[in-house]
Image: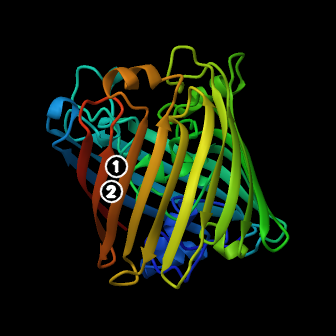
């Protein structure tokens, strides 16, 4: 499968030919190469490609728990690359892929924690069962990707082994990236109804086309891995207490080149017992099924319907469904607009009792609209508005959240 261009922030006429999400290392680099970064061409001819960027996100709301004003902000620095070491310029190439990051808060609260913090007590938050900006935390240094990617069968399949982000292969669609698409997890991988391990964990994943239109993608990943201590993964993945996150996805696409735009898929997942990612002390794990449909109805407009159902205590929601659309090339080819609405029923094992005692409701509505604008070859700005109806752990009936995301990249 050839290196492709991510559609999340450019014209939709160029689509994916890979089984990776729009935020995978190779897709992000390809997007930047499309911006005429000619100074990299000599390195690229030798099979070495790389990119770097810095993100800043600020969020504010006047509707925190108790009517408080709440604010959160953080930055993320990333360096990533791919080195084609086997079969360069062939359809069966093998590559070493890496991505390292530093995630840091600017103040007391990072955006990931704005929804709920420390059991919803003692700190400013929205009392919202969800993640408004899960990628923008105060984690510090981390390794998100360090893996070998091997393409097989004339590019019809891909195998990846090593440390990887499971959201690059599970429940992927064009607007899933928190760096260029929606910020809220309800409109990203799993729709909040899928338990997810950390972003950089030991994993084995594979995908293959089944004829011209059907495909299969699956993976097994360390459910206890930590991206800020990747070598601990040898103990957590292969020790006596090992637990795994497994997925199997069956899908249809208009063509391999359009695999995460014109697409319908169903993803079955299982999250092992007794993991650090459970939402309750019982640590029972969980399982579920997610679905996704997206398709360009014109050259620029891509509506979508996504959702899922889960059991156990690792997912935020027992039920979730999102509808929305992306408008690519609005204003100019590099800009895009996203609008979406989500309904969710919070996880009964973890949150139902507290939600009924606080707000009286176990259902939440979330809406988000963003406009990703690019200025020149190295700068993007994305204003973002989110509306939350009936946040489960708040006595406020609703909450507005206003945000601005900026990106500088080379």
Res 351 quadrant in image: top left
Say which element carries label 1.
strand
Q: Which mark is residue 151?
A: none
Q: Which residue is mark 2?
A: 54
Residue at 52%, 26% in the rendered image: 348
- The x and y percentages for residue 115 are 32, 36
Q: Quadrant of the N terminus?
A: bottom right
Viewed as shown, does residue 99 lie left or right of 136?
A: right
Q: Nearer the viewer, residue 264 or 56?
A: 264
Res 87 quadrant in image: bottom right
In the rendered image, the vertical position of residue 214 relative to residue 75, given as above or below: below
**Residue 40 in sight:** no
Say which element carries label 2.
strand
Tags 2 and 1 touching, CB below 8 Å? yes
Q: Which residue is mark 1?
A: 76
In the rendered image, the vertical position of residue 339 relative to residue 189, given as above or below: below
Viewed as shown, does residue 318 lie left or right of 62?
A: right
Residues at marks 2 and 1, CA–CA distance in whole angstroms: 6 Å
Residue at 58%, 31% in the rendered image: 225
Which is nearer the N-term, disc 2 or disc 1?
2
């Amino acid at each position: 499968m050839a290196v492709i261009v991510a559609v999340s922030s450019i014209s939709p006429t160029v689509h994916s030919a890979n089984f990776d999400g729009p935020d995978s290392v190779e897709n992000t680099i390809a997007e930047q190469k499309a911006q005429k970064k000619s100074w990299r061409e000599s390195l690229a001819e030798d099979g070495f490609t790389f990119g770097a960027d810095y993100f800043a996100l600020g969020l504010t709301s006047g509707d925190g728990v108790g009517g408080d004003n709440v604010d959160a902000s953080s930055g993320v620095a990333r360096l990533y690359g791919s080195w084609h070491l086997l079969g360069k310029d062939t359809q069966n190439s093998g590559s070493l892929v890496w991505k390292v990051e530093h995630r840091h808060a600017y103040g007391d609260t990072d955006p990931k924690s704005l929804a709920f913090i420390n059991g919803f007590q003692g700190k400013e938050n929205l009392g919202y069962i969800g993640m408004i900006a899960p990628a923008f935390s105060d984690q510090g240094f981390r390794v998100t990707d360090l893996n070998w990617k091997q393409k097989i069968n004339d590019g019809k399949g891909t195998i990846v082994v090593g440390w990887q982000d499971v959201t690059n292969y599970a429940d992927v669609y064009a607007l899933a990236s928190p760096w260029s698409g929606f910020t809220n997890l309800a409109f990203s991988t799993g729709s909040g109804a899928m338990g997810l391990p950390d972003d950089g964990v030991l994993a084995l994943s594979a995908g293959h086309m089944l004829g011209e239109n059907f495909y299969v993608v699956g993976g097994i990943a360390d459910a206890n891995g930590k991206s800020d201590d990747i070598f601990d993964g040898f103990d957590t993945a292969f020790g006596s207490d090992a637990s795994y996150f497994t997925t199997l996805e069956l899908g249809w696409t208009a063509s391999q080149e359009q695999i995460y735009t014109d697409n319908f898929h169903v993803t079955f997942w299982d999250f092992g017992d007794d993991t650090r990612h459970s939402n309750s002390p019982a640590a029972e794990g969980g399982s579920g099924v997610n679905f996704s449909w997206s398709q360009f109805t014109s050259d620029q407009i891509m509506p979508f319907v996504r959702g899922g159902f889960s059991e156990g205590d690792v997912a935020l929601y027992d039920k979730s469904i999102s509808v929305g659309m992306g408008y690519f090339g609005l204003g100019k080819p590099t800009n895009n607009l996203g609008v979406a609405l989500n309904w969710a029923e919070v996880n009964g094992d973890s949150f139902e009792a507290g939600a009924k005692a606080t707000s009286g409701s176990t259902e939440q509505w979330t809406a988000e609209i963003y406009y990703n604008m690019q200025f020149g070859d190295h700068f993007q700005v994305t204003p973002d508005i989110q509306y939350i109806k009936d946040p489960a752990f708040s006595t406020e009936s609703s909450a507005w959240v206003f945000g601005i995301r900026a990106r500088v990249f080379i």
